[in-house]
Amino acid sequence: MNEQQERALKEFLLDIDCLKRLDEWTDNFNLFDVLKITHTEIRHSNILSWLLDPNENHKLGDSFIREFVSAILKNSKISDDLALDLLMQNFYSYNVLREHNHMDLVLLSREEETAYVIENKIWSGESQHQLKDYYKKSQEEYVGYKIIYAFLTPDGHEASDPKTWIPISYDDIIPPLEEIIKDANVSSEVKILVNNYISATRKEIMREKPDERLVSICNEIYNKHREALDLIFQNVNVKKSFESEVICNVLRDYSNDGKLVYLNDSSWNFFTERMTTLLPDLEEENGSWGTKYVYYYWFEQYNDKLLIHLELGGNGIPDDSATFKNILSLMECSKSIGNRVNSVVPFKYKRIFTKILTIDEADENSLEKQAKKLIDLALENEDKLFEKLKENNLSVNS
């Protein structure tokens, strides 16, 4: 460390009170974070089951199940007459079943002879024939019923059978829940629990940008102590040291070989030259992630699962721009090569490719091997995308 760096660190430490402005965010308690259940599909389905049941002890009545059903119907191609009939039903007649015949959630009304079968997928992919099995079992059990099938995911991508399963995202259901709990006449315990759930889901599942005041304060602190903070960032792993070192080393190796573009030694994000040519950076940092980037390739790890995504950001892109046309082309081409993509526009985030592999969390070789395999799969998918774009004479709109 040279004299200038030492001075920068000293100035930062002498001004450490500047970090007290972040206390209102860092001191926030969240039950779901403490219990480490934010990324667990079973726990999310349990909470949803409780909230959706109009006769449960949360005292929200049928307000959330009505909004949930409304969101499903809005995303469906069900006729207006049938949709109106469904919305006029007695929602207090519904029971919510968990893991009935292995189905995540079933909203069932014997009185209305209606069933909503809901498959909740946060991180894991569909098992082979899973949705077909659920369809068969429900058709056999609820003979003569109106049966609606919903596929709930973070980004609302389509299921393997898009004709049967209606895509719905957490962005369709969390904002209505937020409005409901805001004015609800319920106990303080229920409000705390529901608000903790909303906060955890927005942060970890919906991947929302932090609020503007937090961003502003962080920028002020960073601009004031840029040199010291850069020095800290360069010498510490932001994520858990073992996993971060392995993933970042793999990304560096691939970048050095010219297979991808890796811009940040502490992040799990990367780009490729041809994808950036197709989706060039925005002029201002007003994209979906609060950056200039229109897309990201990025890794995630949850327990023994390692995931890689190709995600598009829809914010900050004019509908009449070449970039927007290229995004639409990419979405269609991705669907045509077998990826599950929700075609709904406009959007904030749109995942057009995801792969998941199992790792041995304590084995460095396992993590490195699976990380490389995921990158290879992502690059192979990109090859197929650009081949399809070329076939359709849509390689780059300008």
Image: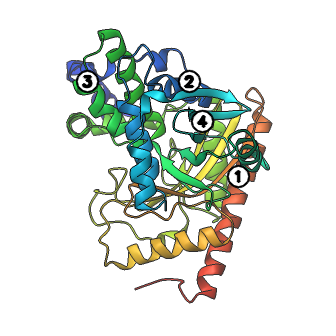
Q: Position of residue 22 (x, y in %)?
A: 25, 24
How far apart marks 3 and 4 lie (CA) works out to 25 Å
Q: What residue would you read off at disc 3?
A: 22
Q: Are marks 3 and 4 in contact (CB under 8 Å)?
A: no
Q: What residue would you read off at disc 4?
A: 244
As drawn, which residue projects farthest toward the bottom?
393
Local secondary structure at mark 2: helix
Q: Residues within 10 Å of mark 3 (few under 14, many from 20)?
A: few
Of mark 3 and mark 4, the one earlier in the sequence is 3
Q: Position of residue 167 (x, y in %)?
A: 53, 53
Q: How is the image coloured?
A: rainbow
Local secondary structure at mark 1: helix
* Quadrant of the drawing holding the N terminus: top left
Relative to the observer, which residue lies in front, 78 or 184? 78
* Quadrant of the drawing holding the C terminus: bottom left
Q: What residue would you read off at disc 1?
A: 374
Q: Position of residue 173 (x, y in %)?
A: 41, 40
Local secondary structure at mark 4: helix
Q: Are marks 2 and 4 in contact (CB under 8 Å)?
A: no
How far apart marks 1 and 4 lie (CA) works out to 16 Å
Relative to the observer, which residue lies in front, 56 or 85? 85
Relative to the observer, which residue lies in front, 314 or 293? 314
Q: Is residue 383 left or right of residue 397?
A: right
